[in-house]
Image: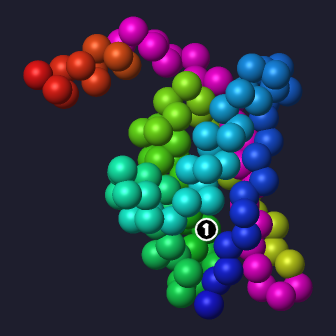
C-alpha cells in the first residue's frame, strides 16, 4: 500500500513573492480528496494511487497534479515533480511551481463566459 504525504511546494526563485499568493489555493487543492467538496465534486485529487506500486502511484499522482493545477489554478504551471521516500515506505512529493507565462486572464474569462451561454 502506498502512502502519499502532503506535497511540499517549492516556487521558482525569480517569482517566489508573486507565486506565494497562490500557495493557499494549491495547498487546498492538493490536500482535498476528489469528491469531498459539495460545490465541485471534481475539486481535489483522487486517491486511486493508494494501493498501487510506488512507481505507478507517483505517475498517477503526477498526472493528477498537472491536470488539476491546469484546471483550477491556471495562473501557475508545474515545472517539476519529484518524490522522497522515507524508511516507512511513505512518499513525499516535491512540486516546483512557476508562473504560467501563457496565462491570459481575459482569454480565460472569455472561455468561462462562453460555457454559460
Q: Which residues are magenta?
A: 87-107
Badge 1, how many Cα within 10 Å: few under 14, some, many 20+?
many
Task: Report if residue 101 lies within the magenta region.
Answer: yes
Q: Tag 1, which secondary structure?
A: helix
Position of 70 with respect to 42 (left or right) is right
Q: Which residue is mark 1?
A: 58
Location of residue 5 (image quadrant): bottom right
- Location of the C terminus by quadrant is top left
Q: Residue at x 19, y 27 (%)?
A: 115
**Spot occupied by residue 65 in the image (x, y as percentages of width and height):** 54, 52
The correct choice, above or below, for 96 with respect to 76 in the image is below
Number of numbered labels in the structure image: 1
In this orientation, does residue 77 appear? Answer: yes
Q: Residue at x 78, y 85 (%)?
A: 89
The correct choice, above or below, for 97 with respect to 39 in the image is above
Q: Check the image and name the residue furthest to the left.
A: 117
Task: Report if residue 74 lies within the magenta region.
Answer: no
**Spot occupied by residue 45 in the image (x, y as percentages of width and height):** 50, 60
**Spot occupied by residue 106 in the image (x, y as percentages of width and height):** 39, 9
Q: Residue at x 83, y 88 (%)?
A: 88
The correct choice, above or below, for 7 with respect to 11 in the image is below
- Location of the N terminus by quadrant is bottom right
- Give the camera-side residue of 101 and 36: 36
**Spot occupied by residue 35 in the image (x, y as percentages of width and height):** 39, 65
The correct choice, above or below, for 11 with respect to 94 in the image is above
- Give the camera-side residue of 108 and 94: 108
Position of 5 with respect to 57 (left or right) is right
In this orientation, does residue 56 appear? Answer: no
Q: Check the image and name the residue furthest to the front.
A: 38
Amino acid at each position: 500500500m502506498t502512502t502519499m504525504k502532503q506535497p511540499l511546494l517549492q516556487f521558482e526563485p525569480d517569482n517566489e513573492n508573486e507565486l506565494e499568493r497562490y500557495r493557499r489555493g494549491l495547498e487546498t487543492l492538493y490536500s482535498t480528496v476528489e469528491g469531498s467538496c459539495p460545490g465541485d465534486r471534481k475539486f481535489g485529487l483522487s486517491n486511486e494511487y493508494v494501493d498501487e506500486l510506488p512507481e505507478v502511484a507517483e505517475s498517477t499522482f503526477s498526472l493528477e497534479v498537472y491536470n488539476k493545477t491546469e484546471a483550477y489554478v491556471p495562473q501557475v504551471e508545474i515545472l517539476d515533480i519529484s518524490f522522497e521516500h522515507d524508511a516507512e515506505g511513505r512518499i513525499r512529493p516535491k512540486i516546483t511551481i512557476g508562473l504560467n507565462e501563457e496565462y491570459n486572464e481575459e482569454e480565460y474569462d472569455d472561455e468561462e463566459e462562453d460555457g454559460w451561454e
